[in-house]
Image: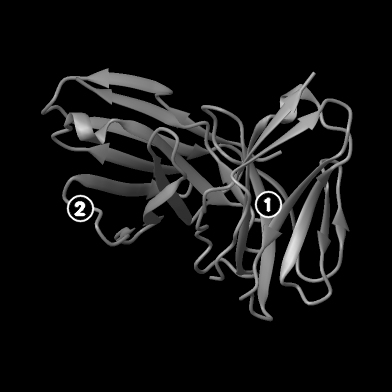
Amino acid sequence: DAKTTQPPSMDCAEGRAANLPCNHSTISGNEYVYWYRQIHSQGPQYIIHGLKNNETNEMASLIITEDRKSSTLILPHATLRDTAVYYCIVRVGGGNAGNMLTFGGGTRLMVKP
Amino acid sequence: GAVVSQHPSWVICKSGTSVKIECRSLDFQATTMFWYRQFPKQSLMLMATSNEGSKATYEQGVEKDKFLINHASLTLSTLTVTSAHPEDSSFYICSAPNPAGGGGEQFFGPGTRLTVL
């Protein structure tokens, strides 16, 4: 799976949009971009994923650049409960075989009042 | 939505004892589950893949005789840390693939914090 690079930490004001970048310059054509987050002392939580089109769900939006070498996770109105470590993971999608996820260092997002 | 549970949520044991951690998929079946370990201020590290009806697959550097994995049914996988030592103290997390998802979506358990004295 392709390696990802994320800033180790970011701050965001409550109520503002949080934009979390991820670089994955070696991504292959069949690899998806997945985002998870881990609130302190809990298991990770799936947020969103995409292949090449931008995606949006009730939690966040995912913007993937046209060359797919980077992406941005957007939390449109960050709340204090969004304080967590956010992981960007690139892996081959589809099927059940090899569903393992490889976690990098992630970005520690601190939402401040 | 689908939920993965773990039991116990935390455990403290003496050095040399064995500890069993259960991972259950509550409203879906999982032929495969994954076990991760997370040390303080570090990321999750995959330990092994648990396969229902067959042997687990361990990642390089993980001792299979120390971390026994049994996938007894389609909803239960157990991790037994045998002869635990203080260096085994960690946060152990399991996950199972979302059966309705496209491969990379995983449901994670809440984690089990193991402290070995």
Vertical placement of residue B55 versus A67, above or below: above
The residue mark sitting in front, 2 or 1, is 1
Q: Nearer the viewer, residue B62 or B69?
A: B62
Q: Residue furthest bottom?
A: A29
Left or right of B95: which side holds B47?
Answer: left
Question: What chain does mark 1 sit on?
Answer: A
Q: CA distance from mark 2 to mark 1?
A: 30 Å
Relative depth, front residue between A53 and B2: A53
Residue B76 bears which disc, if any? none
Q: Amino acid at mark 1?
A: Trp
Q: Tell me if residue A96 comes above or below residue B36 in the rendering.
A: below
The structure residue drawn at horizontal position 68% and vertical position 68%, both measured from the top left corner, is A32
Residue nearer the viewer, A31 or B9: A31
Q: Is residue B76 left or right of residue A45?
A: left
> Circle 1 sits on which residue?
A35
- Percent of width and height locating residue A86: 64, 43
Q: Residue at x 73, y 30 (%)?
A: A82
Callout 2 amino acid: Glu
The part of the image, by quadrant, that contains residue A12 is top right
Residue A3 in percent (x, y) is at: 55, 66
Find numbered disc 1 in the image and state the secondary structure of the residue it sits on.
strand
Q: Which residue is mark 2?
A: B63
Q: Quadrant of the C terminus of chain B?
A: top left
Neighbour class for label 1 at 10 Å: few (<14), some, many (≥20)? many
Horizontal and vertical percent position of residue B57: 32, 61
Residue lying at 78% horizontally and 55% vertically, measured from the top left: A72
Looking at the rendered structure, the secondary structure element under dot 2 is loop
**Horizontal side of residue A77 vs B103, given as left or right:** right
